[in-house]
């Protein structure tokens, strides 16, 4: 949800015009989105993204512990998730934004995926700063 807040802030600043889940739902499965009442579509898009993010977070949990113990493993995983969508899935799905130059939007989405990685990589066993 922290990522959602950051993404909505970037949208409010005009950095993001269409989020990846919006692009997929509107361009690839519009018939599914059309079945959702207009007043609930924003919530449906958010729910789809949270399910995708939770699944990716579960995938992070499958990474060996010794690798997850590196402090940067979460942010690197988040960036890899962003890059996978941006450079593999979006072009494969033929999404319009995959063929456009969008440096500000890409930077904003990159940053919110770093935040996502920080959240999923946070371990109750370790601290970013030690108390001693």
Image (cartoon, grey):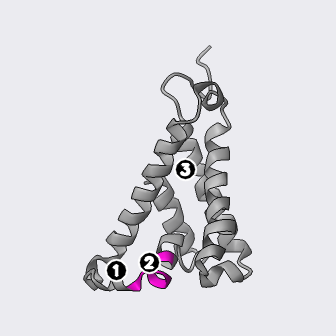
Within-10-Å neighbours for mark 1: few <14, some 14–19, many 20+? few
SS assignment at label 2: helix
Res 25 label:
2
Examine the image and state in which quarter residue 131 appears.
top right
Within-10-Å neighbours for mark 3: few <14, some 14–19, many 20+? many
Res 32 label:
1
Residue 20 location, x and y as percent? 54, 71
Examine the image and state in which quarter residue 87 appears.
bottom right
- Point 66% across, 53% down: residue: 80
Q: Pointer 2 and pointer 1: residues touching (CB < 8 Å)?
A: yes
Q: Pointer 3 and pointer 1: residues touching (CB < 8 Å)?
A: no
Task: Work out whether mark 2 precedes mark 1 in sequence or the reverse, and give the earlier one.
Answer: 2
Residue 27 in magenta stretch: yes
Q: Residue furthest top?
A: 132
Residue 121 location, x and y as percent? 56, 38
Task: Work out whether mark 3 precedes mark 1 in sequence or the reverse, and give the earlier one.
Answer: 1
**Mark pair 2, 1: CA separation:** 7 Å
- Point 44% across, 63% down: residue: 49
SS assignment at label 1: helix
Task: Work out whether mark 2 precedes mark 3 in sequence or the reverse, and give the earlier one.
Answer: 2
**Mark pair 2, 3: CA separation:** 21 Å
- Point 61% across, 41% down: residue: 74
Residue 2 in magenta stretch: no
**Mark pair 3, 1: CA separation:** 27 Å
Viewer-nearest of labels 2 and 3?
Answer: 2
Residue 82 location, x and y as percent? 63, 59
Q: Which residues are magenta?
A: 24-30
Left or right, 42 with reference to 111: left
SS assignment at label 3: helix
Residue 123 location, x and y as percent? 52, 30
Q: Which residue position holds label 3?
A: 116
């Amino acid at each position: 949800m922290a990522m959602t807040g950051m993404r909505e802030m970037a949208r409010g600043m005009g950095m993001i015009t269409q989020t990846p889940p919006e692009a997929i739902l509107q361009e690839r499965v519009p018939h599914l989105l059309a079945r959702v009442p207009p007043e609930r579509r924003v919530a449906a898009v958010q729910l789809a993204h949270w399910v995708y993010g939770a699944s990716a977070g579960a995938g992070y949990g499958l990474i060996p512990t010794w690798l997850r113990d590196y402090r940067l493993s979460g942010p690197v995983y988040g960036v890899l998730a962003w890059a996978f969508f941006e450079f593999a899935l979006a072009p494969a799905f033929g999404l319009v934004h995959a063929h456009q130059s969008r440096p500000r939007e890409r930077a904003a989405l990159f940053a919110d995926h770093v935040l996502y990685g920080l959240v999923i990589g946070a371990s109750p066993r370790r601290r970013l700063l030690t108390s001693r």
